[in-house]
Every structure is written in C-alpha cells, then in structure tokens.
C-alpha cells in the first residue's frame, strides 16, 4: 500500500523516502491507526486521513493497492 504524508507530516515517512509518499509492505488487516503507529506519528497530533480519496477513520482496514493520505489540519479563511 502507498502512504502519502503531506506538509509537516512528511518527516514521519521512512528514512530515505523521496517526496511525500512511500510504499509500505504491511500485513493483511492493517488499519489506518496501525500505519500511523508504524510510522511513529504521535497520536496526539491532529490529522485528517483519507483512503482512496474518501475520509477514513483510524479503524478502517486497508487493502493492497490502497492509498492512505494524511494531512495536517487545515486553517485559514474568514
């Protein structure tokens, strides 16, 4: 599966990663929360998670070929 960590979250990608995404070899049944723990993203850090372009909860199970995108919270506007 592919994981994309954008903006300030890119520091949590595996060492040697170029750009903002990496391909991970994960076991069947892995969840969004499992991947976040694997990447050592602090649990207290607020993030928005999307799988294949749709909002995803931490409990969502990931499948081969899925793309998990993680964004920091967006702010701005009036």
Image (tube, rainbow, N blue to C red):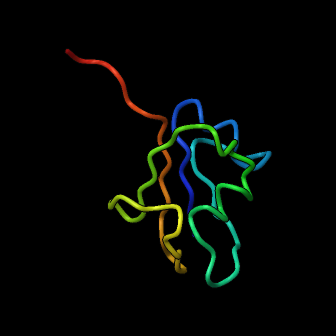
What residue sits 78% from the left and 45% below the top? 16
Can you give x and y, in whole percent of width and height, for residue 21 in the image? 58, 50
- What percent of the width, then of the height, locates residue 61? 52, 76
Q: Residue at x 47, y 41 (%)?
A: 71
Residue sitting farthest toward the bottom: 28
* Residue 4 image position (x, y, % from top left): 53, 51
Q: Position of residue 7 (x, y in %)?
A: 52, 32
Which of the two residues, 3 or 39, is positioned nearer the viewer here? Answer: 39
68 relative to 21, above or below: below
The one nearer the camera, 19 or 57, is: 57
Position of 17 with respect to 60 (left or right) is right
- The outermost residue toward the top is 78
Q: Residue at x 61, y 82 (%)?
A: 29
Q: Quadrant of the C terminus?
A: top left
- 59 over 55 or under it: above or below: below
Location of residue 9 with respect to 39 vertically, above or below: above
Quadrant in which residue 77 is drawn: top left
Name the residue nearer the viewer: 45 or 9: 45
Q: Looking at the image, is 26 positioned above or below residue 17?
A: below
Q: Which quadrant holds the N terminus?
A: bottom right
């Amino acid at each position: 599966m592919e994981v994309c960590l954008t903006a300030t979250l890119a520091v949590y990608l595996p060492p040697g990663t170029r750009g903002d995404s990496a391909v991970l070899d994960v076991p069947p049944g892995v969840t969004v929360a499992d991947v976040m723990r694997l990447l050592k993203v602090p649990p207290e850090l607020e993030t928005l998670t999307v799988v294949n372009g749709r909002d995803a909860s931490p409990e969502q199970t990931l499948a081969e070929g899925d793309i998990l995108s993680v964004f920091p919270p967006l702010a701005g506007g009036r």
